Amino acid sequence: MSAEATVVEKELKVEKKSAEPFLSKRRKNIVTDPLSDDNPITIQVLGICSALAVTVKLEPTLVMSIAVVFVIVFANLIISLMRNLIPGRIRIIVQLAVVATLVTLVSEFLKAYSYDMYKVLGAYVGLIITNCIVMGRLEAFAMANKPYDSILDGLGSGFGYAWIILTVAFFRELLGSGSIFDFKIFEAIGWATFPTNGLMVDSIGAFVVLGILIWIQRSKSGYVEH
Amino acid sequence: MEVFNIALRGIFIDNMIFAYYLGMCSFLAVSKKVETAFGLGLAVVFVLTLTVPVNWLLQEYVLKEGALTWIDGSFESIDLTFLQFIMFIAVIASMVQLVEMIIEKLSPALYGSLGIFLPLIAVNCAILGSSLFMVQKDYNIIEATSYGFGSGFGFFLAIIALAAIREKLKYSMVPSGLKGLGITMLITGLMGLAFKAFIGIAI
């Protein structure tokens, strides 16, 4: 009798040990690491395509960020729930199918509620499917971790991506169109003749702004590529 | 003539990298050596020339609104466009697999040089992007094939040029924070500027 009780007690102890606090240090790190030291764009070099394509103006960039965060979080959650059921050989196709379904949802949602934005973003919403950040997180994290951790990881990577593209968009819209969220900032402060830079609206501006941003970010975090 | 123009536009003006930023991930990751860049570029040309017409057929005879009328007249109101993403990516993934198997069988030497890059291509944005743009541009099948080839070849040129520059770059003094990705982005910007010179080119 007493032996049984000790076994139960032991089990309880094990149970207690494995239960992690809701926001432990490790979990906080999962969210905060991708924001700076392990940023998906500037350090891991993932998801560059859409980072450049939609950043002419801030508004579509914001919509794109929300869409990507949504897709990463839910794809991470779904793949993490299914991780023990997916055969290793066909995992890429399964991951693509899950991501494609989520992206279709986003695209249909935009078409229904914000048709103008759908027109502006065009094919780039569909290209979230092949956004390397999404596939990268699924492959590197969700396939090997529990659902809750995977959601946190998705949030971290999503926001790490979002703040970079929002910063790029801020400078491109400010210098290229002289506005912020379509608000003509230079006219408002009485400098109507502000010379806007056509290159910023063009693809070249995106490369240069992102290049400089990467430089600043890497100098701050001390990361050096060999 | 229009067919050539479409290919030419795809290569120089609507270049996948410099105008649409598609396929940047592999463009940056696989451009450290000319040899590997050549392999990836070739695989991209190959897969694009095949997948764009296949996806065109799919769009025309299955997905478009009223496309299913060739089965029965009563299917006129069916619109399956919402399945576009899933169908396209499935076609691309399976085409890549198929191409990989065919090359392995027919030309082991080519397989040896392309081998590792072929699976990577399934998630290359340039491939899916070309199919999506092809739908927007309303091409017929020959134009679509030409567009696929043109986009692929544009990518091929861009990645080889960048790889050649990066090989030389190894011997230059670059500030430590700018090393690698940073300087590559700036160079890509300058290359894009050079490609702007082709605007308006036509046969």
Image (cartoon, coloured by chain):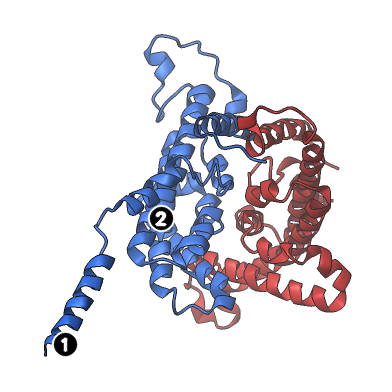
Chain colours: A blue, B red
A213 horizontally vs B30: left or right: left
Mark 1 burial class by Cα count in 10 Å: few <14, some 14-19, many 20+: few
Mark 1 residue type? Glu
In the image, B129 versus A11, the foreground residue is A11
What subunit carries mark 2?
A
Picture quadrant of residue B121: bottom right
Q: Position of residue A127 (x, y in %)?
A: 55, 55
A216 horizontally vs A31: left or right: right
A194 horizontally vs B22: left or right: left
Would you say residue A131 is visible in this rendering?
no
C-alpha distance separating marks 2 and 1: 43 Å
Mark 2 residue type? Gly
On the image, numbered disc 2 is attached to which residue? Answer: A154
Residues under numbered marks 2 and 1 in contact, where contact means CB atoms less than 8 Å apart: no
Q: Residue furthest bottom?
A: A1
Mark 2 burial class by Cα count in 10 Å: few <14, some 14-19, many 20+: many
Q: Residue at x 49, y 45 (%)?
A: A38
Would you say residue A150 is visible in this rendering?
yes
Looking at the picture, does residue A75 appear above or below residue A188?
A: below
Q: Which mark is residue A112?
A: none
Q: Are marks 2 and 1 on the same chain?
A: yes
Q: Earlier in the sequence, mark 2 or mark 1?
A: 1
Q: Position of residue B64 (x, y in %)?
A: 55, 67
Name the mark nearer the viewer: 2 or 1: 1
Q: Residue furthest left?
A: A1
Q: Position of residue B109 (x, y in %)?
A: 88, 69
What subunit carries mark 1?
A
Q: Secondary structure at mark 1?
A: helix
On the image, numbered disc 1 is attached to which residue? Answer: A4
Q: Residue at x 50, y 33 (%)?
A: A168
In the image, B125 versus A183, the foreground residue is B125
Q: Position of residue A6 (x, y in %)?
A: 16, 81
